[in-house]
């Protein structure tokens, strides 16, 4: 059963006089959203805490903007992986059990592999480059193919910050990764990124990362600053090396409920997502700077800002071009084509 729930006062009253076996059919005649007297409740899931900008400036803004529009539609947020881990939620969106998800591209690659290229190392130069790509027709083919393959529509995308290395020693160039067991997420694109960067990847669940670092199961990891801070990794890591090796993409996706909404409701929801897309990057940047200032003042984490990014970028670009298949390479080149 979909997480969208429709309230139809008059329609349900009429259905009460028909046999029980016919009751299910009574609920499906209301085209274009909740219909007259109906209210559409939409579930929105994500994996972030309520203090992170992806929730505060993303999910919550979407819900607030929809409520403000008073279009017979409400958004209920389920943060912190309440409706399942990333890999599980994309399947739930496809099946209709979750309506909207804020999801990383690599997890989406489980249902449509080419979209995972959005998470390729150094595909995007920065968050502005990611925004430019999604605002350009260069992204149209990828997003339409994703929808054609899965039935999942993309409402928008933002960067939740660049990913950086942490370890108990500085990482300034590719050779510094040699001999370090670096935690990477368990997805094909992230594991390819590890090879391209020259890292020895160890797969550890995000929920188990703090303990793995504390116990020495892994030597280091990579994540955006907001995630590093939210997980208190500064307590078990000495250095953050600002490698900026990947834009941490978030796509706002919606399943079959999109086609059930009225045109007005679609416009309201799209406008709400557009507002969030505009706000999240600024919130992320503000949170990142506060966190870096906090670490610099406290000494909890030494900030390495002289990473040889060009050495990493050159090595990665060569590796990806040699190892991507034709379809993946087309997506990668479309992204690089929007770089300034």
Image (tube, rainbow, N blue to C red):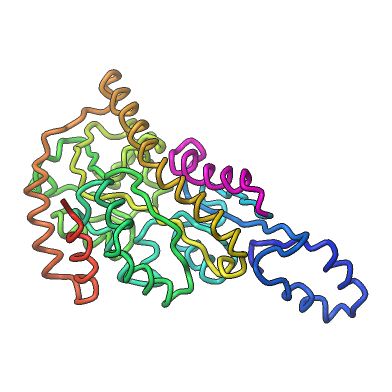
* Vertical side of 11 occupied by 283: above or below: above
- Position of residue 87 measured from the top left corner of the image (x, y, whole percent): 44, 62
Residue 10 visible in the picture: yes
Number of numbered discs: 0
Residue toward you, 41 or 108: 41
* Vertical side of 240 occupied by 202: above or below: below
Residue 54 among magenta residues? yes
- Position of residue 88 measured from the top left corner of the image (x, y, whole percent): 49, 63
Picture residue at 30% right of the left edge, 29% below the top: 289
Residue toward you, 62 or 244: 62
Magenta residues (range): 49-71
Picture residue at 11% right of the left edge, 44% below the top: 309
Q: Is residue 215 left or right of residue 58?
A: left
* Residue 96 occupies quadrant: bottom right
Residue 180 among magenta residues? no
- Position of residue 60 measured from the top left corner of the image (x, y, whole percent): 54, 42
Name the residue at the front extreme. Answer: 264
* Residue 325 occupies quadrant: bottom left
Residue toward you, 189 or 13: 13
Name the residue at the right extreme. Answer: 17
The secondary structure making up most of the magenta span is helix
Picture residue at 75% right of the left edge, 60% below the top: 38
Picture residue at 12% right of the left edge, 39% below the top: 307
Name the residue at the top extreme. Answer: 297
Residue toward you, 149 or 314: 149
- Position of residue 46 measured from the top left corner of the image (x, y, whole percent): 49, 51
User: What quarter of the picture does the N terminus occupy?
Assistant: bottom right
Residue 200 visible in the picture: no
């Amino acid at each position: 059963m979909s997480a969208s729930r429709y309230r139809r006062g008059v329609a349900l009253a009429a259905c009460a006089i028909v046999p029980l076996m016919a009751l299910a059919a009574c609920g499906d005649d209301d085209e274009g959203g909740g219909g007259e007297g109906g209210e559409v409740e939409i579930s929105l899931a994500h994996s972030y805490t309520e203090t992170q900008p992806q929730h505060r400036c993303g999910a919550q803004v979407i819900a607030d903007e929809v409520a403000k529009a008073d279009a017979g539609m409400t958004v209920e947020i389920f943060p912190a992986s309440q409706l399942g881990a990333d890999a599980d939620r994309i399947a739930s969106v496809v099946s209709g059990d979750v309506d909207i998800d804020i999801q990383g591209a690599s997890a989406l690659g489980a249902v449509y592999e080419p979209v995972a290229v959005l998470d390729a190392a150094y595909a995007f130069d920065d968050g502005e480059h990611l925004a430019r790509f999604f605002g350009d027709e260069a992204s149209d083919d990828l997003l339409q193919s994703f929808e054609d393959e899965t039935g999942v529509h993309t409402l928008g995308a933002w960067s939740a910050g660049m990913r950086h290395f942490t370890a108990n020693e500085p990482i300034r160039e590719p050779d510094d990764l040699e001999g370090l067991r670096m935690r990477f997420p368990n997805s094909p694109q992230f594991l390819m990124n590890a090879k391209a960067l020259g890292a020895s990847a160890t797969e550890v669940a995000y929920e188990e990362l703090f303990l793995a670092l504390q116990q020495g199961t892994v030597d280091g990891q990579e994540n955006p600053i907001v995630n590093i801070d939210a997980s208190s990794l500064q307590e078990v890591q000495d250095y953050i090396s600002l490698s900026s090796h990947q834009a941490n993409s978030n796509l706002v996706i919606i399943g079959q409920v999109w086609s059930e909404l009225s045109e007005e409701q679609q416009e309201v929801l799209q406008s709400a997502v557009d507002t969030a897309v505009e706000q999240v990057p600024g919130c992320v940047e503000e949170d990142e700077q506060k966190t870096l200032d906090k670490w610099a003042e406290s000494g909890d984490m030494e900030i390495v800002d002289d990473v040889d990014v060009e050495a990493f970028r050159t090595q990665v670009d060569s590796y990806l071009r040699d190892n991507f298949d034709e379809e993946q390479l087309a997506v990668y080149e479309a992204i690089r084509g929007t770089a300034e």
